């Protein structure tokens, strides 16, 4: 993250970064709150044979995500996932595009119209729209279709059984730099499964680590993840539509990380007039906390002592050469600092002289 003022990325860039992080499997990482609604269970590892990623209020939902090339209407990167508790998308009353749930005897059970969201900042000839929809799921559905008018853009069969998955490693409670996560999975319908691995450093808010996995193990670099004393892993198995998940319920101990700190402005070596406000801006990246509170960002001067707190301050400096230090402390008590040297030049007095002739 950045604390610099007025540095915002476009919607297209944001979506691109998010897709890259989630490996284009956004149903499993819509945001942190939507991924962290699973209830507790006895100590050990929970094994689920049904889609139980989310166990709060709300029934089964079908998440549909992908990209639609315009004007060819060709779908790519389409991901279907049945999960519990996802918030239902708002949708128009009418649209040529729809998500259809088809039951036995080719009977349409439900038809949900939607409007693809046109992605901005794309070059001419590469116009595309994003599909990011959540609709109620009917257990009687045997097929899911994405349509435009009478044309079927994508069709996926709904199997009779959801996959089951069980975590088998790591078994050590205290982890260090890396961890090998392993799991077993089974699909009664014999379908090919893909897996998504998620992580939580506090056992509640899960973030995606890897997705689209075919193997039943993954080596996690914990140096890139926040630390905690109640960390957990979660694996989601997807057979193409239906999902099953398993979450480690025994708290794992992962080392906490220190924040990364730098000073955006002013530049080291800069000179200012003493007594004039000097804009000072911090750049802080921290794995432990999405955003550090202002009181955890402290500015000090070698001459004046404490200058202020927060991501941006504008102190008035006394004359002299100042070593300005910014220190940041996160919720895990880890601290980092950055320093620059600036000079505040004394402003000579202005003397108005009047010459009086004799």
Image (tube, rainbow, N blue to C red):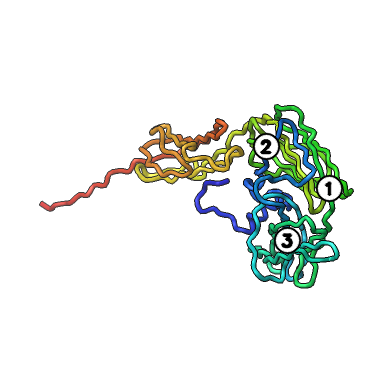
270 on left or right of 105: left
Name the residue carrying label 3.
Answer: 67
Q: Residue furthest left?
A: 358
286 on left or right of 241: left
Instruction: Please tell me which residue is depicted at 46% across the width and 37% down the height of the picture.
Output: 295
SS for dot 3: strand
Q: Nearer the viewer, residue 231 or 312?
A: 231
Name the residue carrying label 2.
Answer: 40
Q: Quadrant of residue 139?
A: bottom right
258 on left or right of 148: left
Q: Which callout, 3 or 2, points at the residue further toward the start of the chain?
A: 2
Instruction: Please tell me which residue is depicted at 73% across the width and 53% down the height of the picture.
Output: 24
Marks 3/2: CA–CA distance: 35 Å
Q: Judge depth for marks 3 and 2 and give the one in front.
A: 2
Indicate whether 208 appears above or below 149. above
Indicate whether 324 appears above or below 163. above
Query: Around disc 2, counting alpha carbons within 10 Å, would you say few (fewer than 14), some (14 to 19), or many (20 or more)?
Result: few
Q: Which callout, 1 or 2, points at the residue further toward the start of the chain?
A: 2
Name the residue carrying label 1.
Answer: 193
Residue contact between numbered discs 1 and 2, judged by CB atoms under 8 Å: no
Q: Judge depth for marks 1 and 2 and give the one in front.
A: 2
Tell me where residue 14 appears, x and y as whole percent: 63, 54
Q: Residue furthest right?
A: 190
Say whether residue 121 is visible: no
Marks 1/2: CA–CA distance: 26 Å
């Amino acid at each position: 993250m950045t604390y610099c003022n007025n540095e915002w990325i476009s919607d297209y860039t944001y979506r691109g970064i998010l897709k890259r992080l989630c490996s284009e499997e956004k149903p499993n990482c819509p945001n942190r709150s939507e991924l962290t609604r699973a209830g507790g269970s006895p100590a050990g590892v929970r094994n689920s044979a049904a889609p139980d990623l989310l166990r709060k209020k709300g029934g089964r939902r079908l998440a549909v995500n992908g990209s639609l090339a315009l004007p060819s209407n060709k779908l790519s990167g389409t991901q279907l996932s049945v999960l519990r508790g996802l918030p239902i998308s708002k949708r128009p009353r009418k649209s040529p595009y729809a998500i259809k749930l088809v039951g036995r005897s080719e009977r349409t059970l439900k038809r949900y119209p939607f409007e693809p969201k046109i992605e901005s900042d794309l070059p001419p000839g590469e116009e595309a729209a994003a599909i990011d929809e959540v609709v109620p799921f009917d257990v009687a559905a045997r097929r899911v279709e994405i349509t435009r008018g009478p044309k079927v853009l994508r069709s996926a069969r709904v199997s009779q059984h959801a996959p089951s998955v069980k975590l088998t490693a790591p078994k050590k409670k205290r982890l260090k730099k890396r961890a090998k996560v392993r799991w077993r999975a089974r699909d009664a319908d014999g379908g090919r499964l893909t897996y998504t691995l998620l992580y939580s450093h506090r056992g509640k808010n899960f973030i995606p680590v890897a997705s689209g996995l075919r193997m039943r193990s993954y080596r996690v670099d914990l140096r890139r993840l926040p630390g905690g004393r109640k960390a957990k892993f979660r694996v989601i198995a997807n057979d193409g539509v239906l999902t099953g998940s398993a979450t480690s319920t025994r708290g794992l101990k992962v080392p906490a990380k220190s924040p990364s700190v730098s000073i955006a402005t002013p530049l080291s070596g800069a000179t200012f007039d003493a007594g004039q406000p000097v804009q000072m801006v911090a750049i802080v990246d921290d794995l432990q906390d999405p955003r550090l509170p202002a009181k955890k960002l402290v500015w000090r001067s070698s001459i004046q002592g404490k200058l202020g707190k927060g991501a941006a301050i504008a102190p008035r400096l006394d004359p002299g050469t100042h070593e300005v230090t910014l220190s940041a402390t996160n919720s895990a008590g880890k601290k980092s600092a950055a320093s620059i040297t600036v000079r505040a030049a004394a402003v000579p007095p202005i003397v108005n002289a009047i010459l009086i002739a004799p």
